[in-house]
Every structure is written in C-alpha cells, then in structure tokens.
C-alpha cells in the first residue's frame, strides 16, 4: 500500500495556498496552484461483437490532479503535480486505470543564454507532447496519462524551435510508487519552423524507442515530417509522413504511415467547420518471415483521432473520416462524424487504441479488408469558470472482416463527462 493517501495531497495543497496568501514567496517569484477534477460515466454494449453474450456494462472514471508552480519569469520554473485515479465498473472487465495518489509531474526548468543562444533545460518527471500527438503525446482521455522521467533541452529563435530529449517511461503501480522503467527509453529530436501564424508550418523529427527488458531487444527508430499550410479557399491542409526502421523481437523493422486532413471554418451563423481525413499505417505481410512491417505509433494520442470508440489506432489500418461541427451558441459545440476502416494487411491483426489485438485471421483463412463504419454525435458545453460538460454516442457497423473472423454484431457506446479546472 502507498503511504500517502489522497487526503494528504489535499492538505498539502491547502497549506501551500495559505503560505502564498502570507506572501511566503521570495521576491520576484510567482506562485500558482491548480486543481483539475474529472468524472466520466461510460456505457458499452457488444464490444466483443457477439450479441448472444451479455456484455453490456458501464464504468465510472474519476481523476483528480493538484498542482503547484513557482516561477521566476524568464529564469526558473519549479512544478509539481499529484494525481489520484479511481475506477468503478459494472459487468465489464476492469481496465488498468486506477492509481492511488501519486506523483505525476515534478520538474525544474532553467532558462538562459549559452554562447548568445536562448536555451531551456527541463529535468524531472514530465509529460512530452509533440506535433498533433500521433507519435508522442500525453493523452488525457484515459485516467492514466503517459509521463517520463526525462531531460529536455529546448532552443527557440524567431520561428524556429528545436527539442532534444531523453527519458524513461514511468510505469503505473496501483500499490506502490510509480517508478520509471529504465529499460523503456525514448530519445530523439523534434524541430519545428513557422515564420508567422499565417505562414506554413514545417516539422521534422527523429525518435528512438528501445526496450532491453528481455532477450528480444526492441530498438525501433522513427523519422518523420509534418506540414500544415493553407490551400485556396481557406482550406487548411495537414500532412504527416513517418517511417520506422530498426529491430523488434529479432526481426528487422520496415514500416510506414501517412496522415492527411483538410478542414475549413466558415465565418457565418453557428460557425460551421467541415473536415475530412485519410490515414494509413502499414501492417505485417508475413508473420513467419524475418521482417516486421507493422507500424507502431509509440506513445500516441488516443480516443478521437481514429473514431471515438477506441477500436482502432494508427497501426495496420486505412481510414477515411468526415466531420462537421457547429456552435449554436458560443458556449455549445455539436460535432457529427463518421469513420470508415479497413485493415492495411489482413494477415496482420486488428489493433485497438491501446495496441490490443481484437481479431487475427487464421493463417489458412481469407477475409475481406473492410472492418466497418463508426458514426458519432458529440455535444460539449463550456459553463464558464473552468467547468465543462460533454457527452456523446457512437455506433459501430461491422463489415466483412469481422464476419470472416468470427461473430459480427454491431457495437454501441455512450458517455457523459463533467470536468472542473481551477
């Protein structure tokens, strides 16, 4: 059992606030405190695509974050954040999404000039977020959020920014303190250039993910490029092209992916926004050979990029998606979407957002590549003062691949969420 309960974190928070009220901060330093509470209720039906089985159930996810920051503007920053995660489930397998009060972030950042160049060094437990999050992100939909014990060196001048980083992914432990996995290492560099807000954005990155925790050493490297620019008609285009190589379970890795989306916001009543997206990620061609062609999105964002039901991720997939959102009033946003999914290679598996294999075709069988279609409707309302409520419904229509690999009943999902940030 962990020795520090949630109540202790709350007491420390109030103590820190009282000290701030008494002007305890050194001259020039600014103190800030925050709290972020979120509760979500989910209902799932038929996620095994077998209507004959009674697998309808629900879950309640709760997450509380408390943070404190001390900053000497332009020079130093100290930040600490505790997080407590709870999960209650009914008629569903219990997901690994709990964690009694623990340290989520704790880092120190130093800013200064070296040889006339502005640099920032951030060291400690922290979240890493780059680009649109398709490769490295601290996704917040699930209770647990990716974090690393890492060092990040940042350089920024004009429209150019560059990060170099090295860190060990932190593993969650429900009964003990969360410690870094010294075998699961992420290192790399991320460069971005944008001359002005209206100018095209160009990004490039190199990522190295290694895991030496067993004899099948993983060393998967990714090089990629991303760009965002405006086409005629005020249409915004976003492109990303990563390529992976290296070793994985004694196999050579050669894998690739592609993303493109087009969007436009209209300056009229209800502020409509229309978007279309295409996604591709390669799958393995032959399990028995010495090459692994499965693209793996490392520590990607989850939930909304590839449908809302978390049935897919950027791995052995093809997707075409359409989305339309409107704002009847400033505080309320309604979004309708549909996503069509295929497997890039039916000889590889169908992976959900966590990388779990949902279906795998037997070696001697055949199947169609089309997996199915998801349709969804979301509503999000900003109540002001940091309070937000949102909810939604999604339905998955199964396709030939699901029929060819087993039972093929459709699936349903609903949720309602309340969050408060101060």
Image (cartoon, rainbow, N blue to C red):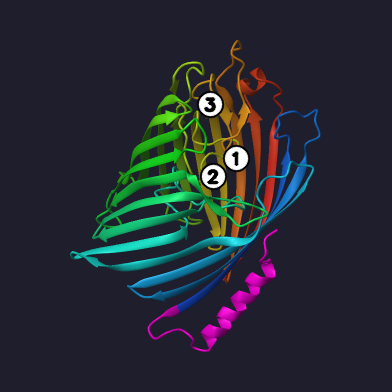
Q: Which residue reaches farthest top?
A: 364
Residue 100 part of the magenta segment: no
Q: Are marks 3 and 2 in contact (CB under 8 Å)?
A: no
Residues 316 and 100: in front is 100
Could you tell me how far apart the alpha carbons at marks 1 and 2 are, in whole angstroms? 7 Å
Earlier in the chain: of badge 3 and badge 1, it is 1
Q: Residue at x 46, y 84 (%)?
A: 25
Give the magenta-colored segment's residue range: 1-30
Could you tell me how far apart the alpha carbons at marks 3 and 2 are, in whole angstroms? 18 Å
Foreground label between 3 and 1: 1
57 up-or-down from 320: above or below: below
Q: Which residue reaches farthest left?
A: 115
Residues 356 and 172: in front is 172
The residue that label 2 is drawn on is 302
189 up-or-down from 395: above or below: below
Could you tell me how far apart the alpha carbons at marks 3 and 1 are, in whole angstroms? 15 Å
342 up-or-down from 363: above or below: below
Q: Residue at x 61, y 21 (%)?
A: 401
Residues 29 and 264: in front is 29
Query: Where is residue 288 shown, x and y percent of the image?
Result: 51, 16
Tag of residue 310: 1
The residue that label 3 is drawn on is 342
Which of the image's four quarters has the C terminus? bottom right
């Amino acid at each position: 059992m962990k020795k520090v309960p949630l109540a202790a974190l709350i007491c420390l928070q109030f103590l820190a606030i009282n000290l701030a009220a008494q002007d305890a901060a050194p001259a020039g330093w600014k103190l800030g405190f925050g709290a972020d509470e979120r509760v979500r209720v989910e209902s799932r039906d038929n996620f095994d695509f077998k209507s004959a089985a009674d697998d309808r159930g629900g879950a309640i996810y709760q997450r509380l974050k408390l943070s404190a920051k001390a900053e000497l503007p332009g020079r130093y920053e100290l930040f600490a954040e505790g997080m407590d995660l709870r999960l209650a489930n009914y008629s569903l397998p219990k997901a690994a999404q709990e964690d009694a009060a623990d340290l989520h972030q704790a880092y120190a950042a130093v800013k200064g000039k070296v040889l006339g160049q502005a640099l920032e060094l951030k060291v400690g437990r922290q979240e890493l977020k780059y680009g649109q999050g398709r490769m490295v992100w601290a996704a917040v939909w699930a209770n647990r959020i990716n974090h690393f014990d890492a060092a990040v060196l940042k350089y920024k001048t004009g429209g150019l920014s560059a990060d170099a980083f090295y860190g060990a992914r932190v593993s969650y432990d429900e009964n003990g303190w969360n410690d870094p996995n010294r075998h699961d290492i992420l290192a790399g560099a991320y460069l971005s250039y944008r001359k002005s807000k209206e100018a095209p954005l160009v990004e490039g990155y190199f990522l190295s993910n290694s895991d030496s925790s067993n004899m099948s050493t993983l060393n998967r490297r990714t090089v990629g490029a991303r760009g965002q620019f405006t086409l005629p008609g005020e249409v915004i285009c976003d492109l990303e092209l990563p390529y992976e190589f290296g070793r994985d379970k004694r196999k050579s890795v050669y894998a690739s992916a592609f993303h493109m989306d087009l969007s436009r916001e209209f300056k009229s009543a209800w502020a409509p926004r229309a978007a279309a997206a295409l996604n591709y990620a390669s799958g393995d061609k032959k399990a028995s050979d010495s090459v692994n062609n499965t693209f793996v999105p490392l520590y990607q964002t989850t939930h909304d990029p590839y449908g809302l039901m978390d049935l897919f991720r950027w791995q052995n997939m093809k997707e075409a998606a359409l989305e339309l959102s409107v704002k009847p009033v400033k505080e309320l946003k309604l979004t309708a979407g549909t996503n069509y999914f295929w497997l890039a290679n039916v000889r590889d598996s169908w992976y959900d957002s966590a990388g779990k294999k949902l279906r795998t075709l037997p070696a001697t069988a055949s199947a169609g590549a089309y997996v199915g279609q998801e349709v969804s409707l979301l509503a999000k309302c900003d109540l002001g003062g940091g309070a937000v409520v949102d909810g939604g419904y999604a339905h998955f229509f199964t396709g030939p691949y699901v029929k060819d690999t087993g039972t093929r009943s459709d699936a349903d999902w609903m949720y309602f969420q309340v969050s408060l940030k101060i």
